[in-house]
Image (spheres, grey):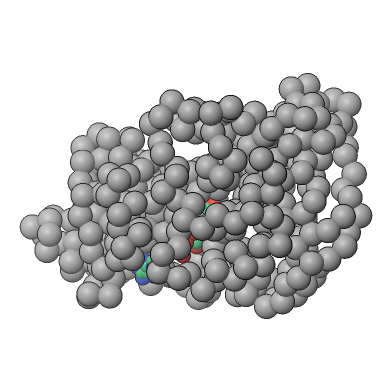
C-alpha cells in the first residue's frame, strides 16, 4: 500500500509499505477524508518529537472500516467512522487513573504519526477499535468529520483545562483552528466576554461566529498590557493558550485574576523552559493554576462531541477553508499548512464520498 511519510526531519514523500495487520481488538480502515494538522508541521519540519524515518504522517480523518479483529463487537467492515487523533489503550493503568491520553507513558496515547504509521495511507491500523472509533453520524459530512479528530476535542479540552464557568471572562491566545474551537468550547460552557488574540481576517470572522467578543493582536504590544487595559486593570478569569510558543505563559499569568486558571493545549515545539513571572504569580501564592494537556480520545467523547454537530449546536464548516479532491493533493495541502497563507484555516483532502 502507499502512504505519505516523513522520510526524516525536513523531508517527506510517498512510500510503499505492507498493509498493517489486524489484531483481535483492532480495526483496519481506509480514509474517506483527511486533514492536515499544525502538529504534522511541528513533527516533520521542526523535528519536535525527534527523528522519525519513513513514518506515515497524519492523525486527522474519517474512514471506512475494512477489517475488524474477532473480539471487536460494535464495528464491522463497511462502517463509516470518526477517527480520533489520540487512540489510548483503554485497559492501561493510566486510562484507569483518568489519563487515557498518557496510556503506556507520557503522550503515548498519541500513536498515529508518533509511535506508529499515521492515517495518510491507503489503509491504517486502529488499536482497541471498540474503545476508540465512533460511528460517523449520517448528517455529518466527511470534511466536517475530519475536524472531530483533533480540532474539536483539543480546542474544547483547552476550555476544560481552563475550567471555564458561566459568566467567566476568557482570553484565548491564538485563533488558528484549535483556538477557534477553544472559543467555541468556552462559549458553549457559558463564558461571557471572550477576548481572542489574533488578526487574520478569516480567523477573526470565524472567531466572531464562535462567540469571541473582543480582539487584540500580539503584534500591537504585550498581550497582558492590552488585556489589563481593556478590563480596568482586573484581568480575566481564565486563559486558554492555543498558539504562540513558550513566551505566551508570562503574559497569561500576568493578566489572570487570582484564582484564575490557564489551560494550555499548544504543542510547545521549541524552547527549554517556560518563564513564570514571580511577582504576578503572587510570589508563589496567587492561586493561579497552570494546566496543559493532550486531547482526550475515546469513543464516548467522540460520540458526545459529534452530537453537538449533529444537533446543529456546532457548525464546523468555517474551519475547512481549503478542500482538495484525491490523494494527489496531500503534499500540496501539507505544504499549505506549513506556509499558512492568510486565508487558510484548515486544508482537507476528500478521498472518497
Ligand atoms: P495555528 O498555527 O493554525 O494557530 C496558532 C495561531 O497562533 C496562529 O494563528 C498564530 O498566528 C498565532 N500566534 C502565533 N504566535 C502567537 C503569540 N505569541 N500570541 C498569540 N497568538 C500567536 O495552529 P493550530 O492548528 O490552531 O494549533 C495550535 C496548537 O495546538 C499547535 O501548536 C498544535 O500543534 C497544537 N495541538 C495540540 C493538540 C493537543 O492535543 N494538545 C492537538 C492538536 C494540535
Ligand atoms: Zn492534529
Indicate the quadrant of ligand 1 in the picture: bottom left
Residue at point 54%, 66% (across, down): 337
Q: Please report the residue visible at 19 percent of the width from the left and 61 percent of the height from the top.
A: 227
Taking 41 as reference, is 61 above or below it?
A: above
Give the image location of residue 294, x and y in percent.
55, 50
Query: Which of the 4 quarters of the picture holds residue 223?
Result: bottom left
Q: Nearer the viewer, residue 330 or 285?
A: 330
Residue 303 coordinates in the image, percent (x, y):
56, 29
Choose between 42 and 224: the one closer to the eye. 42
Q: Is residue 196 left or right of residue 159?
A: left
Q: Position of residue 296 (x, y in %)?
A: 56, 42
Q: Is residue 134 above or below residue 200?
A: above
Q: Residue at x 12, y 56 (%)?
A: 231
Quadrant of residue 290 within the rendered picture? bottom left
Q: Is residue 225 shown to the viewer in this render?
A: yes
Left or right of 22, for residue 128:
left
Left or right, 127 with respect to 235, comes to: right
Q: Nearer the viewer, residue 223 or 312?
A: 312
Q: Which residue appears at 77% of the width and 54% of the height?
A: 121
Amino acid at each position: 500500500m502507499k502512504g505519505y511519510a516523513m522520510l526524516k526531519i525536513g523531508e517527506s514523500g510517498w512510500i510503499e509499505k505492507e498493509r498493517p495487520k489486524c489484531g483481535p481488538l483492532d480495526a483496519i480502515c481506509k480514509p474517506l477524508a483527511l486533514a492536515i494538522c499544525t502538529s504534522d508541521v511541528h513533527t516533520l519540519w521542526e523535528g519536535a518529537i525527534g527523528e522519525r524515518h519513513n513514518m506515515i504522517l497524519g492523525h486527522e480523518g474519517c474512514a471506512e472500516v475494512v477489517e475488524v479483529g474477532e473480539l471487536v463487537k460494535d464495528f464491522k467492515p463497511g462502517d463509516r467512522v470518526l477517527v480520533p487523533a489520540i487512540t489510548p489503550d483503554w485497559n492501561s493503568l493510566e486510562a484507569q487513573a483518568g489519563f487515557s491520553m498518557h496510556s503506556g507513558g507520557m503522550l503515548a496515547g498519541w500513536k498515529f504519526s508518533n509511535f506508529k504509521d499515521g492515517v495518510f495511507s491507503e489503509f491504517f491500523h486502529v488499536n482497541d477499535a471498540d474503545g476508540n472509533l465512533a460511528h460517523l453520524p449520517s448528517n455529518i459530512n466527511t470534511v466536517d468529520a475530519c475536524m472531530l479528530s483533533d480540532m474539536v476535542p483539543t480546542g474544547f479540552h483547552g476550555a476544560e483545562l481552563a475550567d471555564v464557568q458561566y459568566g467567566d471572562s476568557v482570553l484565548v491566545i491564538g485563533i488558528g483552528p484549535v483556538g477557534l474551537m477553544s472559543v467555541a468550547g468556552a462559549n458553549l460552557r457559558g463564558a461571557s466576554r471572550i477576548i481572542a488574540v489574533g488578526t487574520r481576517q478569516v480567523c477573526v470572522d470565524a472567531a466572531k461566529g464562535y462567540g469571541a467578543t473582543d480582539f487584540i493582536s500580539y503584534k500591537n504590544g504585550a498581550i497582558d498590557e492590552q488585556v489589563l487595559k481593556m478590563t480596568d486593570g482586573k484581568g480575566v478569569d481564565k486563559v486558554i493558550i492555543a498558539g504562540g510558543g513558550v513566551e505566551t505563559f508570562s503574559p497569561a499569568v500576568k493578566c489572570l485574576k487570582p484564582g484564575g486558571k490557564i489551560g494550555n493545549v499548544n504543542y510547545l515545539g521549541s524552547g527549554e523552559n517556560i518563564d513564570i513571572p514571580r511577582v504576578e504569580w503572587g510570589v508563589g501564592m496567587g492561586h493561579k493554576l497552570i494546566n496543559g494537556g493532550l486531547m482526550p480520545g475515546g469513543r464516548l467523547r467522540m460520540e458526545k462531541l459529534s452530537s453537538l454537530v449533529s444537533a446543529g449546536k456546532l457548525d464546523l464548516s468555517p474551519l475547512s477553508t481549503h478542500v482538495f479532491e484525491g490523494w494527489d493533493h496531500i503534499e500540496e495541502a501539507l505544504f499549505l499548512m506549513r506556509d499558512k497563507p492568510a486565508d487558510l484555516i484548515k486544508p482537507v483532502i476528500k478521498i472518497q464520498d
